[in-house]
Image: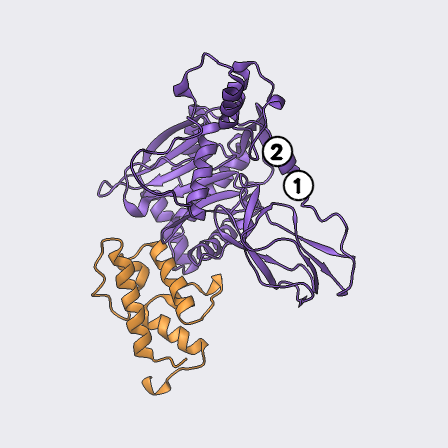
Chain colours: A purple, B orange
Amino acid sequence: MAIPVHVPRVNNNDDTVRVVELLCSEGQFVKSGQILGSVETDKAVVDVAADCDGHVLKVLQQPGATARVGSVLFWLGHAPDEMVPADLLPTASLADAFHKGRPTAKAQQMLEALGVDAAQVPATGERLTVADVEVWRAAGGQRIAMSVAAMPQAPETMPEVPGEAQDLNTEARGMLMTVKWHRDHAAHAYLEMEYDPKPWDDYAAAWARTHKMMLSPLMPLLAYRLVEVAVTMPRINATIVNDRLFQYHPVNLGFTVQAGATLYLTVLRDAQQMDAGRFIESMGTLQRNAMAHKLGANETSGATLAFSSMARWKVSRHIPILAPFTSLMVAHAAPRDTGRAVLGASYDHRLLSGFDVTQVLQTLIKPPA
Amino acid sequence: MKLDRDEIKHAIRAKIIELAHALDMDASNITDTDIIPATGYVDSTAILELVVWFEKTYDFPLTQEEINIDNLGSIEVMAEFLLRRKGMIDDSRH
């Protein structure tokens, strides 16, 4: 029986990926774990490996093609002449089906103002956007009394100054997607709290001495504390979808890593199941993978809560953009020569209040007793 | 790949100076036996960059457990650890 190898999902908000290269051909025998090709996502280039030994029966995409997440990329078989299922069309995942054609929040707002059902307006992409509604409206001559300033201008007109349009690289596209989610969905708010860093510094130094660590465990320990808070306060590990609370089961901690010019939001999954030692070790591995630009799909997607630090750059304030489908990102900063540190938090005010976030920060500024 | 202890140490020192420079620090006085995290020249992220560079430059994958002071604490110790693990200890130097 033929075995499918699917296109992996990397980011919550990327329903398609680009095929970068194929490292196998039809008829070839491949071993389990062998890299068959790679796909490019908004955040990284991700390898696609064989789950088992077998012959490559069918290759369904070519380099440069856009492939839907969850669709079949390769068919493998135990024998070289095995039949491939007739239905080779990409199979949409449940998430794809969920999002397909649905309006963005801004588009939904516009549709409601127009009194128009979303089904009347064709979507040009994965989601029905304001641009789609504008185009439909222009074609139909329909007018609404609505603040233009409240809506993104679409389609964008080209600047008058001479220049050339260039494709964004994967990281820049990822940032664009994140910002769009932030703009279209979250009700962003921010607050911060100064604190005396000495108790935490002492706690981390003691931990480092005990475990003979090369790297200060301060940031991982702070991040781990956030995970512990999420277990006792599940609302910070949730989001809003279609005006309903979506409570995550695992705590998948997003943690920013600047690797050269590339900013990654690495993701440590099921962090709530780890003790502090394992958490620090796992985060160290993740950071090294990011530094080497060798992150797997599971390591760059699915964040449910996030932590970021710009303390090494001595910034006074750091207001992060929320990662898609998260409601809280804690930001650590350490202003130069002040002897003080700052914990800030970007949060989605649809779900969390300033009081909620204050409770989180007040817990975080003190190390465990 | 021929590994020479002095060349390894020179390369590690150059990398530390480069990483410190990015943080506005001058690490040119670092000695072979200084404990790298204690010098204050480089922070945790820079040390991580040093480790990743070390692995890649010498084709020397490390486990997370191996990233500790005993194995990588100073320039001297890093070179020693690399040579020992590669089976290239130059006994005449000791």
In this rendering, the answer to whether A148 lies above or below A266 is above
Q: Is residue B18 left or right of residue A354?
A: left
Nearer the observer, A117 or A158: A158
The secondary structure type at the circle numbered 1 is loop
Query: Which amino acid type corresponds to the residue marked 2 in the rendered image?
Result: Lys
Residue at the image position 59 percent from the left and 55 percent from the top: A62
Disc 1 residue type? Ala
Total numbered labels: 2
- Label 2 and label 1: CA atoms lie apart by 9 Å
**Residue A233, horizontal then vertical, whole percent:** 52, 32
Residue picked out by circle 2: A100
User: In the image, what residue occupies the spot 26% across and 40% down?
Assistant: A335
Instruction: Note whether residue A264 is visible.
Output: no
The crowd level at tag 2 (other Cα within 10 Å; few <14, some 14-19, many 20+) is: some
Measuring from the top left, give residue A112's x and y in whole percent.
54, 16
Circles 2 and 1, Cβ within 8 Å, touching? The answer is: yes
Rendered view: A153 above or below B35: above
Residue in view at x 66 percent, y 66 percent: A31
Tag of residue A92? 1
What is the x, y in percent for residue B41?
A: 26, 58
Q: Chain of mark 2?
A: A
Q: Chain of mark 1?
A: A
A177 in relation to A201, above or below: above
Name the side, left or right, on which B36 lies relative to A17: left
Task: Determine the secondary structure under disc 2.
Answer: loop
Residue closest to the far top: A145
Q: Quadrant of the C terminus of chain A?
A: top left
